[in-house]
Image (cartoon, rainbow, N blue to C red):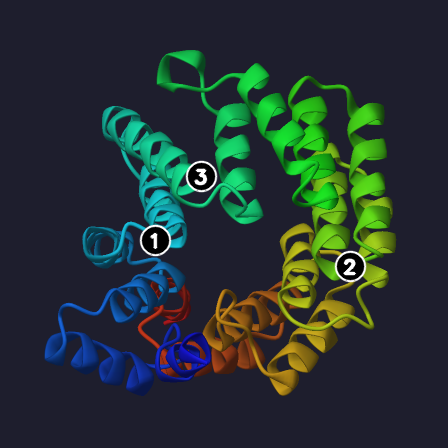
Amino acid sequence: MLSLVLALLFSPAPDRQAQASLEARVHANASDPHAHLDLCRTYYGLENWDAAIRDCETAVKLDPSGTNHDWLGRAYGAKAEHSSWLQAISLAKKVHAEFESAVAAAPQNAVARRDLAEFYVEAPAFLGGGKDKALNQAQALQAISKPASLYVRARLAESDKNMDEAERYYRDAVTAANQSGEFLSELAGFYRRAGKLDQMQQTIAQLQNSTGEPVFDGASMLVRTGRQLPTAIAMLKRYIAQGATADAPVYQAYYQLGLAYEKLGDKNQAKAQFQQSAQIADYSPAERALAKMQ
């Protein structure tokens, strides 16, 4: 019951007003780790990496739970992707430490193990990466989440350029997850990276009856590749109408709509969507898009 109450009181802020309210709650009760975590996730969605790191660090100090460590690792990782090479090296070490701590604190947390496994796949050995370590996580995940275990094996095969094997594992993950939107979008992402855009489109078409973040992810892939833009627009509008999720906030959906209309050459609609995004939250990509259109 307590976790439900906390979920109702605290969640990543979907708009500027909710963000201000959450910030006020944190100011009034600075010792609440749940509020700090959700403020971290709010800043993460806004791509304000420094603020996200600050509040996730506080959440970890107050409550070193697996979830808090995992989100701090994600925040460090996002910051690393937008930093100089030297700073990225330092941040990558922190990512490793946080993901390791997340799994140590919550060994049954499939999300944390999957994040750690992805780090092992992507990071060089001198930063703690290693495909043998990723395989160990895949084996540990077998008893926790078979789809996640198969996903890690797919990532390993893809990293080794074994594309046929990777595709089989991605497809097996979809099957093991009963055709869930989450793993369909992962399969579509694989096809995008592999340059198999027709297969990507076919997989995204299977998301038509899904809800939540996979719909956003599928539409965003269509926008990124310039494929089936009217379909992407329809998916994004449906996603907004059904209620955006915390990890793909509504202002991000309006931003993607703006990009879609921009690629279609409809500058007025593009500007309107970027404006809507920027009105909802201090989302810098939308603000930059608007500045370019002036």
In terms of depth relative to the viewer, which is nearer, 100 or 90?
100
Give the residue at x 29% y 58%. Answer: 48
For marks 2 and 3, give the CA distance: 24 Å
- The answer to whether marks 2 and 3 mark residues whose Cβ atoms lie closer than 8 Å is no
Q: Quadrant of the C terminus?
A: bottom left
Q: Residue furthest top?
A: 126
Q: Is residue 273 left or right of residue 33?
A: right
Q: Tell me which label, 2 or 3, sits earlier in the chain.
A: 3
**Circle 2 sits on which residue?**
180
Label 2: how many Cα within 10 Å (few below 14, some 14–19, many 20+): some
For marks 3 and 1, give the CA distance: 11 Å
Is 221 drawn above or below residue 163 in the view shown? below
Name the front one of labels 2 and 3.
3
Q: Tell me which label, 1 or 2, sits earlier in the chain.
A: 1
Residue 44: mark: none
What amino acid is labelled 1 in the image? Asn
Give the residue at x 84% y 56%. Answer: 178
Q: Quadrant of residue 85?
A: top left
Is 281 drawn above or below residue 58 in the view shown? below
Q: Residue furthest front?
A: 1
**Circle 3 sits on which residue?**
103
What kind of element bears circle 3?
helix
What amino acid is labelled 2 in the image? Ser
Give the residue at x 32% y 32%. Answer: 97
